[in-house]
C-alpha cells in the first residue's frame, strides 16, 4: 500500500502529512503569508520511517499545491530548503 500525502488546512495554517494505520508518521507544517505565499516552517518524519523519502514527497506535494494556486513557497524549514537546493525543477515556486 502506497503512503499518500494528505493536506489539512485550518485558517492561515496547514500541514501536509502521511498517515499509516491511524497514526501520523510524517508532517510538514506551513503558514500563509498574505494571499500569494506560504512559509514551510517544520518537517518531521518518525524515526522508523526516515530514509524513505517521505519528507521529499511532502515537499513535492507542497510544490504541486503552490503551482495549482499560483502562489510561492518560502522554505524556512532547513529540510525543505535543502530539498529545493537539490532539485532545480521545483524552484519555480520560490
Image: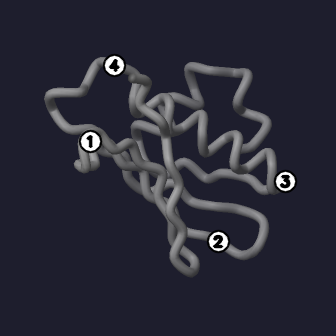
Q: Which of marks 1 and 2 is in front?
A: 1
| Image quadrant assignment for residue 87 | top right
Q: Position of residue 4 (x, y in %)?
A: 47, 36
Q: Where is residue 2 in the image (x, y as percent from the top left)?
A: 43, 24
**Marked residue nearer the N-terminal end (2 or 3):** 2
Which quadrant would the N terminus be assigned to in this image?
top left
> How far apart are labels 4 and 3 at the CA level?
29 Å
Q: Position of residue 88 (x, y in %)?
A: 70, 21
**Marked residue nearer the N-terminal end (1 or 3):** 1
Mark 4 residue crowding within 10 angstroms, few (<14) / some (14–19) / many (20+):
few
| Residue for badge 2 | 33
| Residue for badge 3 | 70
Which of these two is toward me, 21 or 63? 21
| Image quadrant assignment for residue 33 | bottom right
> How far apart are labels 1 and 4 at the CA level?
12 Å
Question: Of helix, strand and loop, which one carries label 1?
Answer: strand
> How far apart are labels 1 and 2 at the CA level?
26 Å
Q: Nearer the viewer, mark 1 or mark 3?
A: 1
Residue beneath the point at 53% across and 55% down = 7
Q: Nearer the viewer, mark 2 or mark 4?
A: 4
Which of these two is toward me, 88 or 25? 25
| Residue for badge 1 | 25
Q: Position of residue 63 (x, y in %)?
A: 67, 41
> How far apart are labels 1 and 3 at the CA level?
29 Å
Residue beneath the point at 44% across and 57% down = 29
Q: Nearer the viewer, mark 4 or mark 3?
A: 4
Looking at this rendering, what residue extends furthest in the right direction? 70
> How far apart are labels 2 and 4 at the CA level?
30 Å
**Marked residue nearer the N-terminal end (1 or 2):** 1
Of the numbered discs in the image, which one, if any, rests on residue 11? none
Amino acid at each position: 500500500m502506497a503512503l499518500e500525502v494528505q493536506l489539512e488546512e485550518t485558517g492561515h495554517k496547514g500541514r501536509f502529512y502521511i498517515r499509516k494505520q491511524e497514526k501520523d508518521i510524517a508532517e510538514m507544517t506551513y503558514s500563509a503569508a498574505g494571499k500569494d505565499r506560504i512559509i514551510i516552517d517544520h518537517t518531521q518524519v518518525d524515526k522508523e520511517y526516515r530514509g524513505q523519502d517521505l519528507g521529499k514527497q511532502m515537499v513535492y506535494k507542497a510544490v504541486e499545491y503552490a503551482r495549482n494556486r499560483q502562489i510561492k513557497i518560502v522554505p524556512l524549514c532547513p529540510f525543505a530548503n535543502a530539498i529545493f537546493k537539490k532539485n532545480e525543477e521545483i524552484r519555480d515556486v520560490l
